[in-house]
Image: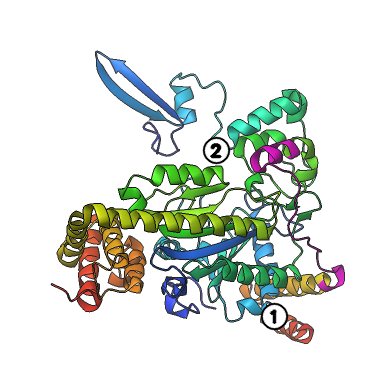
Amino acid sequence: MLCDHCKERDAVVHLTRIVDNAVSQLHLCEKCAAEKGVETTIALPQHPLGEILQAVQQQAAPASSADAAVCSFCGATARDFRATGRLGCAHCYDAMETSLRELLRRLHGSSKHVGHRYDAPRPESLAEVDARTELRDKLQRAVDAEKFELAAELRDKLRVME
Amino acid sequence: MTRRESIDLSLLPDGGVRWLDASGPNADIVISTRLRLARNVVGYAFTARARDGERLRMLAQVREALAHVPTLDGSVLLRLDESSSLDRQLLHERHLVSKELAGLDAQHPLRTGAAVFLGEQVGVLVNEEDHLRLQAMRSGFDVPAAFAMASRMDRELGARVPFAFHKEFGYLTACPTNVGTGLRASVLIHLPGLVLTKEIGKVLAGLQQMGLTYRGLYGEGSEVVGNFFQLSNQTTLGRSEEELQDLLVRVVRHVIEREEEARRVLVRDAGYIIEDKLWRAYGTLRFARSLSFDEAMNFLSGVRLGVGLKLIPGLSVYTLNKLLIFAQSAHLSHSEGHVLTDSESNLARARYVRQVLAREGSGVE
């Protein structure tokens, strides 16, 4: 539902007003609600995980230190996670391991994967794939820039690899 | 591959609708089974946090690798980020891409790098919430076949692209609700008997206690229309792939039995009332001049029940499945050659349904 005021953002604040026995409904986004002076002191969790996340965070550690967890790979914080319900990257699982383990227990009844095990492919076969991907990217860029001589050269290299 | 042109669905290996052909087990009650595995590629932030360039590089890496994945031989790449909104809607109506990937969801605008590889009864969604969603679709109630297919694709692709895997948590996903196996198996099931006998509430509550969940026709966040439900596993961690499938199979088998029992009760206790109601639904579909989508779905549900109970002869489940997909707005717009308004859609829908039923419908008066 769009905000009644700006008609641009999603409405997150829903007000029911009763004036002279007439009931009216107002749906506002966070920004317009703030502008109109409607109190929204905490951003409400907008996903079903929100409540569980908040409970787990509060339990795991005092809010300040839990919020301080930052993923070194993607820069996402525990606060970002709580706001969106989504992790930023695979490394976030290490950065927020303790609180996630508790969350997973609540969500799934377990935090331990018992399904198929997976071994990632050997690096040398990956390097080959990477090199080809890079060549393809370069080729595309050369074609886009109309550098056809270069494109032909890259195409030949790619053929040899394939 | 040509891009920026309207999608030619005839290019898809099976039109993307082989799962509709009603050839699978229990096809009168279970329309289709789908199974998806959520995977992320090592070295990139998850889709929502990744930059445009990262998403495009990841797509290129996967495209490169897919050339060597036999399960996807002959597959077609569709770049959603370069497709019109009508085409994206069309693919979503065909249940080939999620609303999020198609950028049709107000909360998730279309992302650079959003794409799908479509093969025969299989697909790889790229740059959805997770980098990859490997999916397999089958007609009717056939979880083992769908799993075998998805799992083969997973092995073949996972041998060429490194997936994010954690020794304790399993396959890592953007949302913690998918972590572990990353497996979601679901069936699209038609339960009019349980709805009419008002048993459905109890059955759905029971499902949830067993660790399953239900959704509407289009999956997450969609409403239940025409008595069609999607039942799927709720959790993905702490149970093996085989245990998750077993659970779904056991519970769905039970739900099918309950539905059959409800249908027997309806015929026994309210035979002529039901028969009259179902033929009225057929009559409306056969002759109405304007049909909204919800209306069409509800009447189709009645007719489907009539066919299941053998009260309406001469009409195939395949025809009903086809109507379910092709009577949707984007499909109607596509076949009319331009985008239709709601009221134009209603007229086109009624015309289409009339034509199909005149051709393939029951000849009984």
Q: Which of B87/B255 is in front?
A: B255
Q: Where does residue A2 sit, x and y in percent of width and height?
A: 40, 38
Q: Count the numbered circles shown.
A: 2
User: Which residue is rendered at x = 38% and y = 37% of the image?
Assistant: A7
Q: Is residue A107 magenta?
A: yes
On the question of residue B225 being in view, the answer is: no
**Which residue in the structure is indicated by mark 1?**
A151
Picture layout, residue B103 above or below residue A120: above
Q: Is residue B95 left or right of residue A105?
A: left
Residue count near mark 1 (Cα–Cα under 10 Å), binned few <14, some 14–19, many ≥20? many
Q: Which numbered tag is attached to residue A47?
A: 2
Q: Which colouring convention does the figure follow?
A: rainbow
Please identify the quarter of the rendering in which residue B145 is found: bottom right
Q: Residue furthest top?
A: A20
Q: Which residue range is magenta in the image?
A: A101-125
Kind of element beneath mark 2: loop
User: Which residue is rendered at x = 42% and y = 54% of the image?
Assistant: B258
Q: Where does residue B28 sit, x and y in percent of width and height?
A: 38, 67
Q: Where does residue A84 sit, x and y in percent of width and height?
A: 60, 39
Q: Amino acid at mark 2?
A: His
Q: Earlier in the sequence, mark 1 or mark 2?
A: 2
Q: Residue furthest left?
A: B365
Picture layout, residue B224 above or below residue B163: above
Please identify the quarter of the rendering in which residue B56 is found: bottom right
Pinpoint the chain carrying mark 2: A
Q: Quadrant of the N terminus of chain A?
A: top left
Q: Is residue B125 left or right of residue A67?
A: left
Q: Is residue B138 magenta?
A: no
Q: Which of B312/B258 is in front?
A: B258
Q: Is residue A137 left or right of residue B330?
A: right
